[in-house]
């Protein structure tokens, strides 16, 4: 099974700030990597797939990058609604897996 | 519009089984696979398995292989997931989610509202 390791576990930042979340895969997953955002009490929401393709309606302040085993999600100019949990997800091999998550909190 | 509506909350005793359904609408049910994902209280997302809604083939996580069954009922565009031999560790929110693309390698995009399952004696 492919293990996805997200870092850091918690990221503190200020509104208007910029953050970069990391996701490392235990083996190459090509570009079959997605990012999800989850707010308390809600199902996850797809943000990014194919490493860097934004889901419909996602603001341009979100960007994804990386390849192979190292991936990032960058949020520039943090808005209040961006403070949430973020999960990376690989769909390159069975079983599909999720990373452990990163909490982005207000500093 | 695409909708996934799940069954309601369940409370089960240890050793019992639970069966959750996911009623899909607003798209061609047979074209997009459905995954099952769970989330224990205060924990992250755990991928459980996937069902091919065209032919019923399934893939599941190793940790669940002996304990879960995923089925579909095409006539009613409904997917089902059963978990057997429940323990308190199975207390979680259970989600169904639809593949974004009608190909093998696809993330999920639409999610059900979740079904809370509590296992307690």
Image: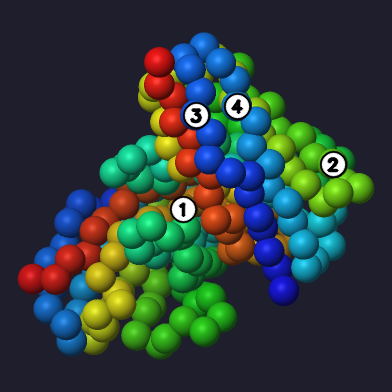
Q: Secondary structure at mark 4?
A: strand
Evaluate if marks 1 and 4 touch, with contact meaning CB atoms under 8 Å apart.
no
Q: Which mark is residue B11?
A: 3
Mark found first going from the N terminus, 2 or 3 = 3
Residue occupied by mark 2:
B73
- Expressed as whole percent of the image width and height from the top left, the position of residue B62 reads 54, 25
Q: Residue at x 53, y 76 (%)?
A: A55
Q: Which residue is mark 1?
A: A89
Seen in the picture, residue A41 relative to A66 is either above or below; the reply is: above
Q: Which residue occupies the foreground of this view, B6 or B32?
A: B6
- Tell me which colouring the rendered structure shows: rainbow
Looking at the rendered structure, the secondary structure element under dot 1 is strand
Q: Chain of mark 3?
A: B
Q: Nearer the viewer, mark 2 or mark 3?
A: 3
Horizontal side of residue B115 vs A24, given as left or right: right
Image point 68% across, 41% down: which residue? B21
How many numbered marks, from 0 up? 4
> How far, Cα to Cα, is label 2 from label 1?
28 Å
- Neighbours of disc 4 within 10 Å: few (<14), some (14-19), many (20+): some
The answer for how far apart the CA atoms under marks 1 and 3 are is 29 Å
Q: Is residue B40 left or right of residue B104?
A: left
Residue tagged by mark 4?
B18
The span from disc 2 to disc 4 (Cα, nearest Å) is 17 Å
Residue A22 in sight in this render: no
Disc 2 on helix, strand or loop? strand
Quadrant into which the N terminus of chain B falls: bottom right
Residue name at image x 59 percent, y 63 percent: B109
> Pointer 2 indicates a residue of which chain?
B
CA separation, marks 3 and 4? Answer: 9 Å
Whether residue B14 is situated above or below residue B44 in the rendered picture: above
């Amino acid at each position: 099974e492919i293990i996805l390791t997200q870092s850091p576990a918690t990221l503190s930042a200020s509104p208007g700030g910029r953050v970069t979340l990391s996701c490392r895969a235990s083996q190459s997953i090509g570009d079959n990597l997605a990012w999800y955002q989850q707010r308390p009490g809600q199902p996850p929401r797809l943000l990014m797939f194919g490493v860097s393709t934004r889901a419909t309606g996602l603001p341009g302040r979100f960007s994804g990058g990386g390849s192979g085993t190292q991936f990032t999600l960058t949020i520039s100019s943090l808005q209040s609604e961006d403070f949430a949990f973020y999960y990376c997800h690989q769909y390159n091999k069975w079983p599909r897996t999720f990373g452990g998550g990163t909490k982005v909190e207000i500093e | 519009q695409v909708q996934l509506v799940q069954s309601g909350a369940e409370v089960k005793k240890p050793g019992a089984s639970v069966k959750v359904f996911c009623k899909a609408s607003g798209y061609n049910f047979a074209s997009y696979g459905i995954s099952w994902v769970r989330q224990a209280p205060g924990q992250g997302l755990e991928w459980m398995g996937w069902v091919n809604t065209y032919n019923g083939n399934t893939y599941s996580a190793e940790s669940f292989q002996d304990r879960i069954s995923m089925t579909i009922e095409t006539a009613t565009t409904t997917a089902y997931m059963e978990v057997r031999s429940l323990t308190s560790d199975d207390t979680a929110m259970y989600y169904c989610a639809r593949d974004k693309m009608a190909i093998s390698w696809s993330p999920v995009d639409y999610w059900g509202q979740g079904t809370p399952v509590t296992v307690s004696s």
